[in-house]
Image (cartoon, helix red, strand yellow):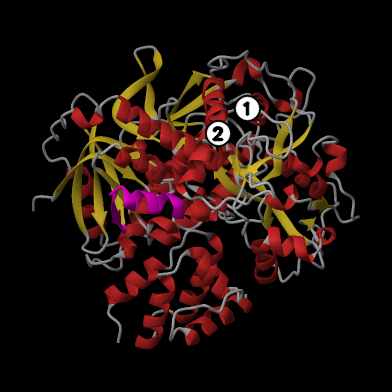
Amino acid sequence: MAQTIHKYDAVVVGAGGAGMRCSLQLAKAGLRVAVLSKVFPTRSHTVAAQGGIGASLGNMDEDNWHYHFYDTVKGSDWLGDQDAIEFMCREAPKVVYELEHMGMPFDRNPDGTIYQRPFGGHSAKYGEKPVPRACAAADRTGHAMLHTLYQNNVRNKTQFFVEWMALDLIRDSEGDVVGVTALEMETGEVAIFHAKCVLLATGGAGRIFAASTNAFINTGDGLGMAARAGIPLEDMEFWQFHPTGVHNAGVLLTEGCRGEGAILRNKNGERFMERYAPKLKDLAPRDFVSRCMDQEIKEGRGCGPNGDYIALDLTHLGGETIMKRLPSVHEIGKNFANVDVIKEPIPVVPTIHYQMGGVPTNIHGQVVVPKNGNPNTIINGLYAIGEASCVSVHGANRLGTNSLLDLLVFGRAAGNHLVETALGSKAHKPLPANAADYSLSRIAVLDNSTSGEYPQDVANDLRKTMQLHAGVFRTQASMDEGVKKVVAIDERAKHLSLKDKSKIFNTARVEALEVANLMEAAKATMVSAAARKESRGAHTVDDYGDTVEHPLGRNDQEWMKHTLWYTEGNRLDYKPVNLKPLTVESIPPVKRTF
Amino acid sequence: MLSDAELSKLRWRCRRGFLENDLVLERLLKARGNEFTRDEFTQLKALLELDDNNLWDIIAGRNDDYPPDTEPMVATLRQTLSTH
């Protein structure tokens, strides 16, 4: 049967913050835009972002983008590209004010300016003292942002395809991307979206780990699509562990807790971060705080009967402040830890939270790959934005509030770039013959299966393996073993079986297709991690500890470079980090202390 | 009797934007399997139309402004949350 073909100027895959910021820019310019989403747009994972959007507005204290730039470069442990970081930090106030003008209900100061709260790793005067930089809407910033963007998109006639799962990129004989295939869940039919450009805005793949703060929808679909289309994934060994995931639940307690004054304590009640980070204390960057928490637990100062967690103490903030500024934290404490945070500390552990790597792009969101000696050759017709992408502004460790900022800045930048390059007046490149065949064959394998394992069984084994071998604390031997195990699970994933072969709303089929995407993200993570023989940012390996030659285990001589993983042959390549900002002096690498 | 397609759609719409709702709804689906009456199905479907934060506020007991006629399912969800 011939596939239905939908024709648009641009197709955005994913309706979170990045996707909808981009689609809005395109729709406002009069372009025909389709947005594909597995779930209703305002139920995308951006809704979970609590803390805020980082921007040096200077509403509470002296601040400017140079300080924000410095903090982000240092936070990235010098793996972030300094051109992209400068671009993001300079654009930050602009995108926040734009959002304000669209109707975003930011918290206010008495004088009417946007209220800003402190956040980990954000400082004034180049690390001298913490600065309030996070622009928030209570602890529901992501929710407010998604609603603002969705309403503006509807007003500008963006067309949403809800409960559609994008399957594969369509590339022509020149390697240009000319569309995407997608499964309509309601009917089980595969359709072709023929487009002048496709934008991947599918978020991260946090569900490759067993203990994760991510929603179940975060299965790295854009990563799988890119990898299967021969595009490498960049820096996938770097996964952020949020210091304050609720022990035994994974549910996240926003960093805004510590911004408002919450304190991490060990079993002796000691505020141990004063020892590790005398200046920033509990507000040091996430990777650093996570590492310190582990150190406390490993040295026998963890809390609880098994000494396996840290206590987050908010009691001194008072009930009124907690209920006003951090109401969700109170609810989470009650319902997932059986704790009233007004009266007693809550047990927390570092938990998988954010993917720093992704599909490699430049600052316009264009996907770039190595070709003929140029490490950043543009793939025509393909963009990636948000957590699915690696631009790379977060490097080896993201600062809190820079994720929502990333979505806004690069979602908008990609949209602007397409408008400026006159996308509307360009012609569609022809679709290749049988453009949907690859996707149809993948589905046919599932539908024709007569034996094999169920998708969820394989996915659960994958998650356990990733947690054990690529979790917060890594050793070389464990990572090497993890590579073998993940390759073995990949073989199992090629022979999945479906109990239900029906077409209409067959969620088992959707989950099997998600497992294929999870596998690509997991292989990229495991192989890239085992290959990187140093400690940097979130990639902390016991074998590569603090030495005079390599402070904190970081080896700039050999490893200040981006990893590129290709699914074909499970092979790696590398490309240099861009240490040259757009207009200012480079921040030279030094040992990170706080 | 609910059709397989109705149940599948219900299960998919239990996939939410944040983990708290995912976990509670997963607990419910595990506990109930396919055993939903038509009334329960209708009530849960109406609640799943809500935004994640509104749904979470209702499940967590912070907000009683839920859709008309969904009170029994709200009580079930609150019970599911508190019996973890």
Instruction: Look at 39% across and 44% down and name the residue there.
Output: A19
Query: Taking A554 as reference, is B36 left or right?
Result: left
Q: Earlier in the sequence, mark 1 or mark 2?
A: 1
Residue A325, quarter of picture: bottom right
Q: Position of residue A483 (x, y in %)?
A: 51, 39
Q: Is A497 drawn above or below residue A80 in the view shown? A: below
Q: Position of residue A309 (x, y in %)?
A: 76, 56
- Answer whether residue A157 is magenta in the image: yes
Instruction: Look at 39% across and 54% down and name the residue there.
Output: A151
Is disc 1 in contact with disc 2, using a CB cutoff of under 8 Å? yes
Chain letter behind tag 1: A
Residue type beneath disc 2: Ala
The mark found on residue A65 in the picture is 1
Q: Is A553 drawn above or below residue A338 in the view shown? A: above
**Quadrant assignment for the C terminus of chain A:** top right
Where is mark 2, residue-wise? A92
- Which residues make up the magenta segment? A147-163
Query: Taking A485 as reference, is A63 left or right?
Result: right
Chain letter behind tag 2: A
Query: Taking A389 as reference, is A112 left or right?
Result: right
